[in-house]
């Protein structure tokens, strides 16, 4: 598995979260089919994928299919497998922009942020995290990897390095900057780490991944008494995007803030503007509304 991780890092430039995900899925495949890769068959691989698909949702299944194909291509590349078993991994039906983004209403967002009120380091940290997610639309990994040097206090900006090491400098709203300063004033002192956000449970180390940031959101939702279909940090990213849309910000500018590489990804959020859609929707024959 170490060799597979090294191969991903060298030949694919995979990030640490991707390495963990691909290694986990590859390990599960080995446990299910056995360590002797030469005995794996097309049917066994397909049955494993279909079994996983029956226990997971479509987004999780799609990620697993991608990771398993990468692992099987690696086995073929290193001649551990005589056949290209990656071709045996079936695809699942999926349509871009088919679903509506899950987001919070303005009233729900106020309640979630208010659920982090307090003066303890933990509450101040959570308050700053929620504002970064909901005002700037950052990803969980963006927040977990944020460093002190990324914040330009003089010019009021923050540098974010997201997917594919794509870096962008975003404006830092006064509200968010104030929340960050309040947290940094009481932030636990650590050795050589310059990460902004640390775990509140000793030892105070940086978040290992974006999972810790998503956990902050989940706990805030629970304290606010809000039940949402999505419970992680991406819920607030969707909320930030839809809020910008409702305030009349053009899609191309929203895409720049969210660091989308395609306008099609940003167009995903246009479907939540129901008021605008009502204005352009054509009447259905024989139906009065």
Image (tube, rainbow, N blue to C red):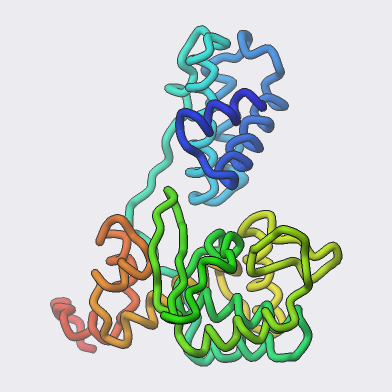
Position above or below: 87 against 95:
above
Give the image quarter of residue 216. bottom right
Position above or below: 251 against 110:
above
Position above or below: 288 against 209:
below
Residue at 51% across, 39% down: 14
Q: Quadrant of the N terminus?
A: top right
Position above or below: 64 against 117:
above
Give the image quarter of residue 272. bottom left
List the single residue furthest toward the right: 202
Q: Is residue 183 left or right of residue 130?
A: right
Residue at 45% across, 85% down: 173
Q: Position of residue 258 (x, y in %)?
A: 38, 67
Q: Position of residue 132 (x, y in %)?
A: 53, 76
Q: Position of residue 149 (x, y in %)?
A: 55, 66
Comparing 63 with 45, the one in front is 63
Residue at 69% across, 26% down: 32
Q: Quadrant of the C terminus?
A: bottom left
Q: Position of residue 130 (x, y in %)?
A: 58, 78
Comparing 190 with 255, the one in front is 190
Comparing 1 with 234, the one in front is 1
List the single residue furthest toward the front: 154
Q: Is residue 37 left or right of residue 87?
A: right
């Amino acid at each position: 598995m170490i060799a597979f991780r090294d191969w991903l890092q060298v030949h694919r430039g995979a990030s640490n979260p991707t390495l963990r995900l691909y290694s986990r899925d590859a390990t599960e495949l080995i446990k299910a089919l056995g360590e002797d890769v030469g005995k794996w068959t097309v049917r066994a691989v397909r049955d494993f994928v279909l079994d996983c698909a029956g226990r997971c949702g479509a987004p999780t299944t799609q990620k697993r299919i991608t990771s398993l194909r990468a692992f099987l291509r690696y086995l073929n590349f290193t001649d551990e497998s005589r056949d290209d078993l990656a071709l045996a991994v079936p695809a699942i039906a999926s349509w871009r922009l088919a679903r509506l983004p899950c987001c919070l209403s303005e009233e729900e967002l106020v309640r979630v942020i208010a659920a982090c009120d307090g003066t303890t380091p933990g509450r101040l940290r959570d308050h700053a995290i929620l504002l970064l997610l909901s005002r700037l639309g950052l990803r969980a990994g963006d927040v977990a990897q944020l460093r002190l040097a990324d914040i330009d206090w003089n010019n009021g900006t923050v540098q974010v390095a997201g997917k594919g090491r794509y870096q962008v400098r975003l404006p830092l709203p006064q509200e968010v900057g104030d929340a960050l300063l309040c947290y940094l004033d009481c932030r636990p002192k650590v050795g050589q780490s310059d990460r902004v956000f640390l775990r509140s449970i000793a030892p105070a180390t940086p978040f290992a991944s974006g999972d810790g940031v998503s956990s902050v959101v989940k706990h805030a939702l629970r304290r606010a008494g809000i039940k949402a279909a999505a419970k992680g940090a991406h819920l607030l990213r969707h909320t930030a995007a839809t809020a910008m849309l409702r305030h009349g910000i053009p899609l191309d500018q929203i895409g720049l803030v969210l660091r989308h590489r395609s306008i099609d990804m940003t167009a995903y959020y246009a479907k939540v503007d129901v008021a605008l859609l009502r204005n352009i929707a054509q009447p259905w024959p024989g139906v009065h509304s």
